Amino acid sequence: MINIESHQELARYLLEQGLITNQEKPNCKNLYGGVSNRTVWVSCSPAKNWVIKQALKKLRVKEDWFSDPQRIHREAEGLRWLAKLTTPGSVPGFIFEDHEQHLLIMQAITEPHHNYKRLLLEAEPKKIHTTRFAHLCADIHRNSYDRRDEIAPKFADTGFFESLRLDPYYVFSARQLPEAAPFLFKLIETTRARKRTLVHGDYSPKNILIQNNQLILLDHEVIHFGDPAFDIGFSLAHFLSKAHFRSSLRSQFTAAAHLFWQSYFKLTQMAPWAADLEQQCVNHTLGCLLARVAGKSPLEYLSSSQRTLQKMILLQLIEQHPATMQSLIEQFEERLNSYG
């Protein structure tokens, strides 16, 4: 197994595969920030400007966390399908995959572009980005349902979603906080039963690049056919956790959470698969907000005291169980404000 973070080794591999010539000398740079892959940017020419990902068996986190490297090939399949389900330019172009080396090559996004998570940590959320983030998610869910006879068999295996989401987020949190266990295990049960649309599974600002207000979605290794409400809860947990972290912009981030939900729900509420959608989205938002402070992958920007406070607030909200998304967002903000 090659190590693509060794640039000499990677260059030799690319030459052997016929992806570059002897005359081409690749410029390589390791990219960090993710925990589940080695990732390297490679440039030989304007036409050969790539990102190469190689799946790790043991993830780069404090806790022991393992996942089958075969997931990179699920990502490759997801990349090919998302290009059919979304507007042009919404995902990087597929270049190459290697089943023995567990690697994927895709077209790099040209500069200038910005990472959505970084923008949200440095400035206030923009309505155009929030709305397009919601619309892109709705497109994936609606369009995949329309082609479910083709898509469902290809993405039926939820093993990577189990090992990278349900277990490290919900199961681990339930073990840390027994008082939340009944809610979380019930949520896991309903999630497994809901086979409705394609689910990205990692739909967060971290995995969005913005170029001239065009949103480009990355990192598809957890994609599967399942419960679309998970994507909404996963996304909203980021907006609301940033409302916690960036207290001076709290009202702007809760407004963004409202806008994201309203924009998504407007496009999906009449869909055949949208029965009980709002309540399940509320449940996943509660679950993800808790998991991002109690699970195996806590949000790095929240301090220890902020994580403790968020746990306390979420345990209260889980017990109260808001009936609507508007109520959940409002109550989360009220509790943050009341605790300072």
Image: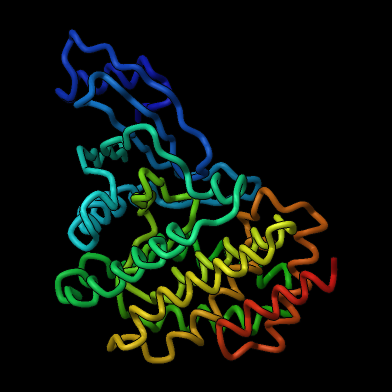
Q: Position of residue 186 (x, y in %)?
A: 55, 84
Q: Position of residue 258 (x, y in %)?
A: 54, 74
Instruction: Examine the rendering and report whether any part of residue 170 can be seen.
Output: no
Left or right of 12? Residue 119 is right
Going 31% across and 86% down the picture, which residue do you hit? Answer: 273
Going 41% across and 61% down the picture, which residue do you hit? Answer: 133
Q: How is the image coloured?
A: rainbow
- The residue nearer to you, when weighing 47 against 38, is 47
Left or right of 181? Residue 259 is left
In which quadrant is the N terminus drawn? top left
Left or right of 20? Residue 139 is right
Instruction: Examine the rendering and report whether any part of residue 6 can be seen.
Output: yes
Q: Position of residue 321 (x, y in %)?
A: 65, 88
Q: Position of residue 167 (x, y in %)?
A: 54, 65
Height in image: 334 above or below 340? below
Height in image: 334 above or below 199? below
Q: Quadrant of residue 52?
A: top left
In the picture as drawn, the residue positioned furthest to the right comes out as 339
Q: Quadrant of residue 77?
A: bottom left
- The residue nearer to you, when weighing 68 against 191, is 191
